[in-house]
Amino acid sequence: MLKIYKFRLLKMLFSMLVVLATFNQSSAQDQYELNSGWLCMPSAKIKAKGSEISNATFSMAGWKKAIVPGTVLTTMLANQEVPDPFYGMNNELIPDIYKTGREYYTYWFAKDFKEAVPAADGQVWLKFRGINYSCDIFLNGQKVNTQPFKGMYLRKSFNITKLLSKSGTNRLAVIVYPPDEVGNPNGGQGGDGTIAKGVAHQYTAGWDWIRPIRDRNTGIWDKVYIEKTGAVSLDNPHVVTLVPGKRQQTGIQQPALIKVSAELKNSTAKVISGNLVYTLNGQKVIQPVKLQPNSAAEINFPDLSLKNPKLWWPAGYGKQDLYPMQISFLENGTKLCDSQTVNVGVREIQTEWNVTTKSKEVLVNGQKIFIKGGNWIISDAMLRFTKSRYDTEIRYHRDMNLNLIRIWGGALIERPEFYEACDKYGMLVFQDFWMSGDCNGRWEDPQKLEDQWKRRQYPDDHHLFLESAADMIKMVRNHASLAIWCGGNEITPPDDILIPLRDQILPKLDGTRWFIDYSNSDSMSQNTLGGNGDGPYTIQNVSTFWETKTFPFNSEVGSVGVGDLESLERFIPKANLIAPEYIAPEKRKAKGPSEKVDSVWDYHNYLGVGYEQHILPYGKPADIADFAKKAQLVNYDQYRGLMEGFSSHMWDWYTGVIIWKTQNPWTSMRGQMYDYYLDPNACLFGLRSGSELLHAMYNPVDGMLMLVNNDLKGRQNIMLDARVLDMDGKETSLTKVFCFMDPSSVKKVMSVKKIVDELSAKKGAFLSLQLLDENKKLLSNNLYWLADNKGMYSGLNELKASAIKTSAKLVKTGQIEVTVTNPANGPVSFFNRVSLVDGQTKKRILPVFYDDNYFSILPGAEKKVIIDYYPEKGAAMPVITLTNYIGQEQTIQINP
């Protein structure tokens, strides 16, 4: 019986793949978004049926303004019915759906719009890119969906041509129901786990980096479009680029092979003939087509050999060239019916097994790439997605010198706008499907309602999971940045999902990318160390990253991320801005915590971070401001050390590392390079330093000076200049030596441990490592602050002020250059932070991009920092503030 079920499931699925009308991320020729003018009302307050509500004569007096795309909670927040759940303990004031029942968050959404009945064979389509969790749709008194519309990860397209009003004024009404299983938010990972019974994201019932989302994100959460076509509509174009051989970043390229297909649907009762046409780089490819009445077909073009292609490379390895490809269907070869544009990055992803590390290597265009990645949850926990926020967040990842982002499996297939930003900035993407070991039964867990055997079969509807996976694959498969598919987070899907996904759906709909059955699979990284194949997740002694071998392609390893005082003030009430207090082991209760933490900090997931014992070597914090300042030293040191330690064993121990995690979709403190409000902390700049393409570094275990070259080309005649400076700025040269670097390699230069230990023994010291090219241009500038022989940073507390000079000038609209000069014969100007701030409030302008920050300047040196930002029209010129570790503060006016 099971075999018959599986056969029917696959047969039904693959027939659906061809005939289901969906829409691609690419831009269609004639469409507009329904993103304003929506009204809503709780269904409990509406007695009328959908056929009545969607009639123009139905009065909507008293209905509330609604946010679409959005959720019930975002609408309630906009209408000031609930407080900001991201601030303080406000989330506790919002009723949870587990207690209220699903009806409380079941809502009607309605929208009036203008669209005339098309002439001749014209067709009008209503398209949804995502609802959560199920809905019924009505237009002008008629029900639109004849079949159930259910599942968070499913786009739907409806032909509404015959339902349009003759007057041209139409009313759309949609009732949206919450998930069938909302889960008990009992404090477990995904609450009691039952949230995973649906095909939706699991984090909404709570995790160790977020509190429960009270409505479980019920609503029309993604975009709604009206699209107009001719008799034939074009959907889901598919572009595959094959780049054989090992390619170089520049120079003349051998041809690339371009394979293209698209789905066509004839919505008329007549046979239609025409041409499916695409144009790429001035070359036109034509495929004649004959479509039967009311039919759909997938059409393949003949292959195209693209001469001397401009290749797409990951960040740091080359340019991210994209070709606009227009695909059109012309009825009878002349009449345009439908058209879409796809941005094509010409590249090929491959993998090889590294027998030394016992893990996979990722290759792009034949070149192996050492993976430096970050784990991504979701941009905003309440699904308030914007193209600009995506662009900012992905740019931050590029600016950290990372080359991959992994999308965690408890969230979603990220939106096309996310992928567009990844294409633009060169970030490879490792995309999970919707499973997690926590909810889906990998481990025994007393907080879960059902046992492992039952959780192992989640979700309840396996067919819906496969249907949704097929649709989401189609939505993002054309993006050059998409590199890896993954079955789930720390667990494989059940066999009747995994096998058809791996063996039929992905080969048919994509077939060009690496598929991993789960995120820490032995097929990715052979686990010879025990445990889950990932971690650790807490603050480490920096030497640990260098000397302790972990998993050879580690999908999750992370540390800290608390922001500075201005960041904390954005979501913690003043009364709760109390620094955590370290509890010595002898004073703890059995298995008690190592820190005494304020309840609001605990609510925002600070508990277990464990900063204090790592801050104490800098001196016990005097107050919250001192704690936050010293936390930035820990942040910087941790993430520089993490990436340096992994890079020091590139191709020997490791082929890749993915940090857990680089951002938060909520005001959490559990690991982040920038806060929810897009304000970077020192983690970002420490990681930026440690991840440099060409980098000089110091092994704290054996004192070895090392160089790492991630580039695909070697480097000749680069000089390593290593010196130690004491707290007064007195300098001792360690070496000035010419070095030669092979491509993608690590080099040991010399050990300086004995002399460095001697020079830092009394009060600590600074170790400066600089790389210079033949023209003495600075290629890498890395400054360590070293503890004394007692492990304390005693000298930093005695550091004297520097007579630094500063200036700032406007380079162009939205770009400022700041110059900071530290006079000779004085101390190091240590840990400077520059901020672009509003001239009146002195609060930081966000987001802003600094090409460096939390920087130090040697005596007699100058530092230039480039700041990019988005100036508001008509706003006054901002100003720059500069603060450093010893408390110097300056306000710098910007010269136009």
Image (spheres, rainbow, N blue to C red):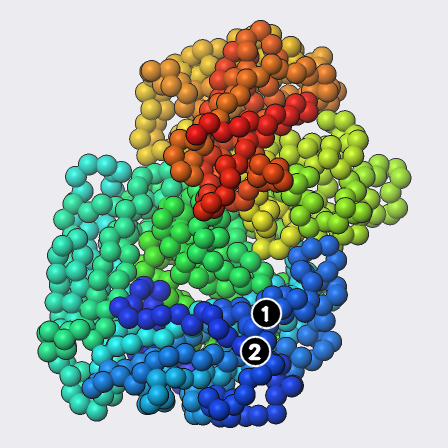
How far across and down, in percent of the image, does residue 540 sit?
65, 37
At x 16%, y 45%, the residue is 308
Q: Which mark is residue 817?
A: none
Q: CA distance from mark 2 to mark 1?
A: 9 Å
Residue under pointer 1:
75
Mark 2 and mark 1 lie on one chain; the one further toward the N terminus is 2
Left or right of 447 on screen, residue 548? left
Q: Residues within 10 Å of mark 2 (few under 14, many from 20)?
A: many
At x 59%, y 19%, the residue is 829
Q: Residues within 10 Å of mark 1 (few under 14, many from 20)?
A: many
Residue 584 falls in image quadrant: top right
Callout 2 secondary element: strand
The reply to whether discs 2 and 1 touch (Cβ–Cβ < 8 Å) is: yes
842 vs 328: above or below? above
At x 26%, y 77%, the residue is 229
Residue type, label 1 = Thr
How far across and down, in percent of the image, does residue 97 sit?
68, 74
In front: 641, or 516?
Answer: 641
891 vs 576: above or below? above
How far across and down, in percent of the image, does residue 183 sit?
67, 73
Left or right of 495 on screen, residue 890? right
In front: 105, or 349?
Answer: 105
At x 35%, y 84%, the residue is 168
In front: 737, or 855?
Answer: 855
In front: 861, or 469?
Answer: 861
Q: Which mark is residue 40?
A: 2
